[in-house]
Amino acid sequence: MSLFDVLRFALRALLGEKLRASLSWIGIAMGIASVVVITSVGDGARRFVLEEFGQFGSNLLQVSPGKVETIGVPGVVGGTTHKLSLEDATSLRSIPGITGIAPNVFGQARVEHGERGRSVFVLGTSRDACDMWRIELSGGEFLPEGEARAALAVLGSKLARELFPDGDALGKFVRAAGWRLRVIGVASPRGQVLGWDFDDVAYVPVASALDMFGREELHEIDVSFSHAELADEVVASIRTRLSERHDGREDFTLVTQGAMLEMFDRVLGALTLGVAALGGVSLLVGAVGVLTILWISVGERTQEIGLARALGASAGTILTLFLAEATLLSMAGGLAGLVGGLACTTLASWLWPSLPLAPSFGYALAALATSAIVGLIAGVAPAVRAAALDPVEALRAE
Amino acid sequence: MIELTGLSRRYVLGGETIRALDAIDETIRSGEHLAVMGPSGSGKSTLLNVIGCLDRPTSGSYRLDGREVAGLADHDLARLRRREIGYVFQAFHLIPRMTALENVELGMLFDGVARNERRERAVAALERVGMGARAHHRPGELSGGERQRAAIARAVVMRPRILLADEPTGNLDQASGRAVLELLDALHEQGLTVIVVTHDPGVARRAQRVLVLRDGRIVRRMPAVELRSLDEALAGAVP
Ligand SMILES: Nc1ncnc2c1ncn2[C@@H]1O[C@H](COP(=O)(O)OP(=O)(O)OP(=O)(O)O)[C@@H](O)[C@H]1O
Ligand SMILES: [Mg+2]
């Protein structure tokens, strides 16, 4: 019997019992659909985050004040907590392997030029930030070397456009927080990255920013280093250096970009696995459904099986026919689930265009294959039962 | 040619052995038209099933055209059933969800005959039994006689050499029964070995020869023309 004929025969038999068959494939469909949706959400999120991170330089780490990993609340358990000072930041420059230091302070301020003004993020940083964050300039240059106070500013493209609608901002002066700043550079448009609008900012020297906002401490220090392999070494050196400066206490937190990505990946992985497991459970339920339906079907079609034997079907042919039925039944569920899942993700990305969704062809194929295999396995017991029927008794069955 | 030697089919039920067939010795010529009679439970269906390779003898020998069949594997028996043997049942056994045509195609389907050829041959077979116009009807839309004619078309579409019919007219009225019997006669005329199990002496008399079974044994062999009733045949049997 040819494979085509086997499949046709099985399909006809299934179509003869649509309602009952549908009961069993719905379980499979739900399993596959949930797997499709979740993997596309997970994949989309992962891709999104990787892309966003990719917009920064690589080999970055961040030092922030306070220790989040320890149990004690900083500043409560014993003594004073040292914040991160500008001197802390500059002291890191001498650590081998470190290629850039960006001591950062930020705050909201109104930046004005003539009649025009705009409330934006003012970011105090150093020249190194330019490379670290891959800031490109459409004109002028970035902040000068060193951490010295200076009345200078680099404007984001949108801010520049708003303040200087008809042309060149370079060399002009803007006012912010009581300072009169000379515009030395304008950044190229970039858009939002990880929720941060790079175009609506003003960069100023860090020391100036500390003054503007009346602060003593930095919000964070971004550090770049030359090779990924140096990460551990650089982290250790920074830890030693800062602890020394802070009376031997580690009251700051170090996070490398790699560790951040890794953590994100772990969370996402756990989430995906969890939902995949849920999908698996629903597949299992579907499989039990397929098994049950087919088992009942074998009972009801005993005479038909006996007849098939009398007409010359071997036990092997009967086995094949029922396995084909189980596989088709399950694949129908798989296909329905695939279509349903893709419909869901399409609808979702239509309703919320910013949602990062990436339905993957590979996953879809894997889902179909999984449903086929699940069906095949679920079909074994009923198919073996059908094939083992004694033809004479099967024919005599009621 | 069918040669049965010491052929037995026993069932063990609750420690008790039932001899459905008990040491049968019989030879059935190719092209013979044979009727099998006997009281209920005498082993007629069992005999037919063994000859039809649907059941295996517990002991003894069954040679089909000189070839020992008793020890063949399931796969080989299935091929014999497909190609050498046609079955007609009292209960018709048509698959309800399939049209008459599709039912007739079944045997060819299992034999791997290509679809177009299947269709052609099935249509021709249905036409030969006068069912051409009913080819696309499902069994539920056919009368008993029509169903049995479709079943006969199905039994012979593979051009078997043996046609086995177990009470083929048992569920039919007189007229439909006669039509079915005429078909069987015609098939015999074309050279098929036809074996009919029946309770009806009228049916048996259309055969050439009658075997009478009792308790799994052949108790009488007689020319069909001499048969008057089962009781009389049994009365004249060797004890
Ligand atoms: N599967 C089985 N298990 C036990 N005994 C069986 C089985 N099949 C048949 N028998 C017994 O074998 C004997 C012969 O049965 P068979 O069906 O051949 O009789 P029959 O002559 O065809 O009867 P009927 O005219 O009623 O159809 C009977 O006694 C029956 O009870
Ligand atoms: Mg019987």
Image: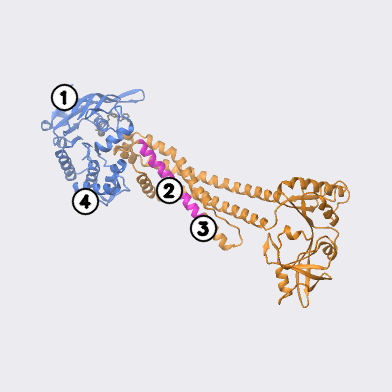
| Secondary structure category for the residue under label 4 | helix
Q: Residue at x 59, y 53 (%)?
A: A43
Q: Could you tell me if residue A360 is visible in this image? A: yes
Q: Could you tell me if residue A71 is visible in this image? A: no
| Secondary structure category for the residue under label 2 | helix
Looking at this view, is A183 or A62 the one in front?
A183
Q: Relative to A237, does residue A123 appear above or below in the rendering?
A: below
Given contact means CB atoms under 8 Å apart, are the residues at marks 4 and 2 in contact? Answer: no
Chain letter of mark 3 equals A
Secondary structure that dominates the magenta span: helix
Let me know if marks 3 and 1 both belong to one chain: no
Label 1 amino acid?
A: Ala
Query: Which of label 3 and label 1 is nearer to you?
Result: 3
A141 drawn magenta: no
Spatial CA span between label 1 and label 2: 56 Å
Q: Which residues are magenta?
A: A315-340
Given contact means CB atoms under 8 Å apart, are the residues at marks 3 and 1 in contact? Answer: no
Query: Which of label 4 and label 1 is nearer to you?
Result: 4
Using residue B129 as the reference point, say whether residue A87 is left or right of it: right
Let me know if marks 3 and 2 both belong to one chain: yes
Q: Which mark is residue B237?
A: 1
- Work out which quarter of the rendered image holds the C terminus of chain A and state it: top left
Q: Which chain is orange?
A: A
Q: Position of residue A293 (x, y in %)?
A: 43, 44
Label 2 amino acid?
A: Ala
